[in-house]
Structure formats: structure tokens, C-alpha cells
Amino acid sequence: MRLCEICNAANGNSFEVGPCHICNDKAMQTDRMVDAAAGLLSAESIASFSLSTVMPKDWLTREEDVWDVKMKKSQSIKNFLNRMISTSLEKKTKLGYENDGDCRIIFDYEKGAVQLERNDLFVFGRYKKLVPGLSQSRWICSKCEGKGCDRCGGKGKNYESVEERIGEPFKRSLDAQGYVLHASGREDVDATNTAGRPFVLEIKNPKKRALDLDALALEIAGSCEVAVEDLGIVGRNFVEIVTESHFDKTYEAEVEFGRPVSEGDIELMKSLQGRTIAQQTPKRVAHRRANLVRHRKISGIEVANAMGSRITLRIKAEAGTYIKELISGDEGRTVPSIAELLGTRAECRKLAVTEIDDGFLDFFRRREPRP
């Protein structure tokens, strides 16, 4: 049994060199492929790279034939090539090799070719939605699927979005292919958020990676619709941390009642503090949410302003509480509700998220290794 120089080295140089039983001499293309990969990497504005090797399955089968003959000092040809290639590329490019580098270089031994993929970039921050009328994510018109029609006024979408206000400046700055906003929950289109909602912006295929986060924050704030703060680069794992975390929130709600509110009514509303309510999926979101009954705790409620039949409430509630339905009762789907307690119509006219108890994320970011 004979092996090429590379496959033989992976097996402790225990065989005669000749036409290779494992790779049919295709591994001997490695030096040429490394040179091609170095050229691709050198053209990128990056600090690190990662590596993938793709090899025919029959290499692995024939490799086991070699191990049946002599297993001592043998190692996987894939692992051997990965170490050989990464070391060579570090020397040629002066870039660092990392498991999740700025770019991924792919060695395809079936085709004898190399390919470069730019790894996505992830930026953590907190956004403030300063005006109503913005959806959080891009909301494409279902009638025209983004092409523009009479229903959407030719825009191709139902609303402008927080995602676009944040993502477009990053896309332009990094010459990226696209972006996706991952956030911890969302507020209604007609609600505002002055608290700062945690998010991770995933930036797709960025040709550049150097970021001036302060300048980007200023550009985003220039819209006077969305502002961002606490920006910083994070690892891919932070997407799941943010989207799977749930935080208690404080809201300020302007409420209109069917009659003037008395001192007794105010005390009845305050009696909700510390109570757990049952909320069946609201009618307004039933078309996109499972029809369930959720139990949520109201940990705080106070009246900030009262004038006749209009009052301002500050409500602190468990994550996932539907505040509008806590107020209106949603035709009996939320029990108890403010409308039920007072025995009159109650409607939320204006809603803002004013606090989010998400300090856990800052603690976690301090403990995260720098990407």
C-alpha cells in the first residue's frame, strides 16, 4: 500500500510513497490551494479567518484501510490537513486563525478549489422607538410581496420599521449584503419605547468589518424616530441569549374610561398590584399566535395623573403581559381587568415602555470573551 507525501505524513510516514491509496494524490494540491486561499484572504479587510475542509467520503473509507494495516502514529487526514493549512495561511497572510474568524476559507478537495465566505457580524445594542407607527421588523405587504401595489401605496410594505432604521446605516457602512434584527420581545406598532430594548443586529456578508459605532449611533438618531445605545460587537451566541431572555417591564399608559374616575376607582385599580391575571390570546393577535391562556403577574400599578375620565397609569408587569388587554379586558379574555373592576369601558389611548429589567445582559456581556 502506497500513500502520497501528505497522507503518509498523517500516518507517521509508515508507508512507501507512491500513488496514494487514500486520496489518489489529490491532497498534493494543497500548496497550490493554500496560495489561492492566501490571495483571497489578503484582499479582505479582516483580522482573522476560520477554515473548513471538504473531502470525498471515499477518502474516509480508504483511510480506514490504512488504519487496519498500521494504526500507530496515525491521525485523521482531515485533522492533519486543517493544522497544515491553518499554519501555512497564518504565515502567508499574518492573519490569526480562529474557530469563528472574520472570514471562512473552504478547501474543496473534490473540486481542487478554494472559496471564501465572509462570516456574519453581530452587534448588540438597545434601541429606543421614539415615535408610534413603526413596526419592529420589516413588514412586507402580503398582497404584492414587496413589489408595490395599491394596498401598500406602492411601498411594498405595511410599515416603516425599527429594523430598517438601524440596519440600513450598518449595511451602507460595511458594504454588506443584508441584515436581520433579533430583539428581546417587541412593542406594538402604535406604542413607543423610551426604555431601550435589547437587540442583536446580524449583518450579512460584510465586505468591511471596521465599525465606528459612535458615528453609526449618531446617524441612526438623525431620523428622530429611533435611537440606539450600548452598541458593541458580540459573538453569534448572543442572538440566542437576547431572544430567549424575558424581562419584566414598566409601561406608561394613557387610559380613557366610559365615565369620570373616582378615588374609589383608583383604589380598585391599585388592588391589581401583586395579583396574577389570566390572559387568553388577544383577539388582535389571534391570527398569528396560539390560542392559549397565559398567567402573568402585575407587580406594580400606580396612577400618575387623573383628570375626569382620562388617567395615566404606570404598570410594572411580568414579561409577556398584554397591557392593552389588562386595561380593556378584551371582551372577557383577560381576567381580572381594569375595565371589569371598574364596571365601565376602559381603553388604552397611548402606550410607552419606560423600563426594562434587563441588567442581566450587561453582566453576561462583561463575562463574554471578546469576539
Image (tube, rainbow, N blue to C red):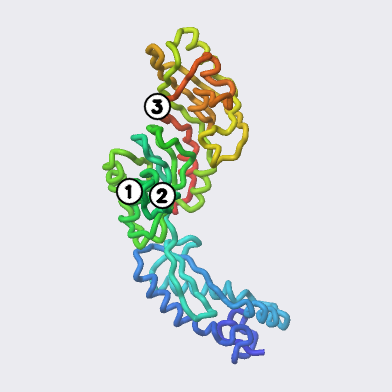
Q: Residue furthest bottom?
A: 18
Q: Vertical placement of 253 versus 205: above or below?
A: above
Residue labelled with disc 1 = 213
Quarter of the image with the C terminus in it: bottom left
The image quarter in which residue 174 lies: bottom left
Does the CB distance between marks 1 and 2 fall below 8 Å?
Answer: yes
Q: Which label's residue is closer to the chain start, 1 or 2? A: 2
Q: How many residues crowd mark 1 within 10 Å: few (<14), some (14–19), many (20+)?
A: some
Q: Percent position (x, y) of residue 297?
A: 57, 26
Q: What's the residue type where badge 1 is placed? A: Leu
Q: Percent position (x, y) of residue 126?
A: 40, 40
Disc marking residue 350: 3
Q: What's the residue type where badge 3 is placed? A: Lys
Q: Percent position (x, y) of residue 185?
A: 49, 39
Q: Residue at x 47, y 65 (%)?
A: 50
Q: Which label's residue is closer to the chain start, 3 or 1? A: 1
The image quarter in which residue 196 lies: top left
- Marks 3/2: CA–CA distance: 31 Å
Q: Percent position (x, y) of residue 153?
A: 34, 46
